[in-house]
Amino acid sequence: MDHKSKLRQIALGALVALGTVQGVYAQALTDSGASAAVVSQPGTTTALPATTQDQAGQSTALTPDEAKQSAAGNVAELQQMIRGSDLKELRTTYNGSYGASMLFYPKEMTYYVALFQQKTFWRVVKTEDETRAEMIYKDFVRQTMQLSDVEIRRTRLEAQKAFTERMIALSQDRANRLQADLDVAHQQQNIVNSQQQQTRAEATALAQQKTAAQAQLREAQRQVQELQRQLDSGLPTTQH
């Protein structure tokens, strides 16, 4: 066999190996499509999800053995075990609607590390290596933090928007109240101004009437005096 033939065989072998790994990983994601009800476990701190859906996203790299286990149905296996009482929840972290859990099966000294969203399993890795389980759990927790960033930001923005809208409503209500008070004040001021004009007109008319009455009084008094003088004409006057 010449040198070129050997190179072709090596390249062909590498392509076959790559295709095998990709097929195992694709099967691992496909097999995560089972579903079951959520069951709370005795001795655990949270209600773990018991359903799974195939979702795209970041994930920790699996070893070949873990890929084979996942292809065999780690999600389905974990769902079955959750229904029992032997599985122990060691750690669970929530970030937004995303979560990561590390569970332990004492009878076989086996760890199950799960990544989920809204009580729905995303990934499940089974391993007997405690260190490996801790590493995968930490990686899953990191992923929940990254994945929840936008969700948490949206939640905060929704709260800020609602708060701002509430403050706008309160401010508008306050402005409406002030405007109502101002309208009343303007209306009352117009009434007062009208009353003042009418009062001044009445006062002016009364003053004119008073002047005319006083003139009439003086004229009447003059006439009385004149008539009295005429009546007393020719009569003796009293001397002091």
Image (cartoon, rainbow, N blue to C red):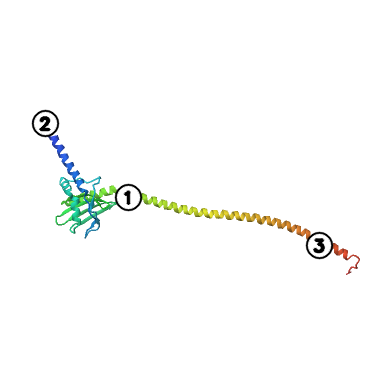
Work out whether mark 1 precedes mark 3 in sequence or the reverse, and give the earlier one. Answer: 1
- Residue type marked 1: Ile
Q: Where is residue 9 drawn, in percent x and y?
A: 12, 34
* CA–CA distance in space, label 1 to label 3: 101 Å
SS for dot 1: helix
Residue at 61% over, 56% down = 192
Residue under circle 2? 5
- The tag earlier along the polypeptide, 2 or 1, is 2
Q: SS at mark 2? A: helix
Mark nearer the N terminus (3 vs 2): 2
Q: Picture coordinates of residue 63 (x, y %)?
A: 17, 46
Which circle marks residue 221 in the picture?
Answer: 3
Residue 112 image point, x, y percent:
19, 52
Splitting the image into 4 quarters, where does residue 44 fall? bottom left
Question: Are dots 2 and 1 in contact, CB under 8 Å?
Answer: no
Could you say which disc has been placed on residue 112 in the image?
none
Which residue carries the number 1 mark? 152
Report the residue at 14% width, 35% height from top. Answer: 12
Residue type highlighted by circle 3: Gln
Q: Residues within 10 Å of mark 1 (few under 14, many from 20)?
A: some
Position of the C terminus, as image quadrant, is bottom right
Q: Amino acid at mark 2?
A: Ser
Residue at disc 3, secondary structure? helix
Quick check: 197 left or right of 165?
A: right
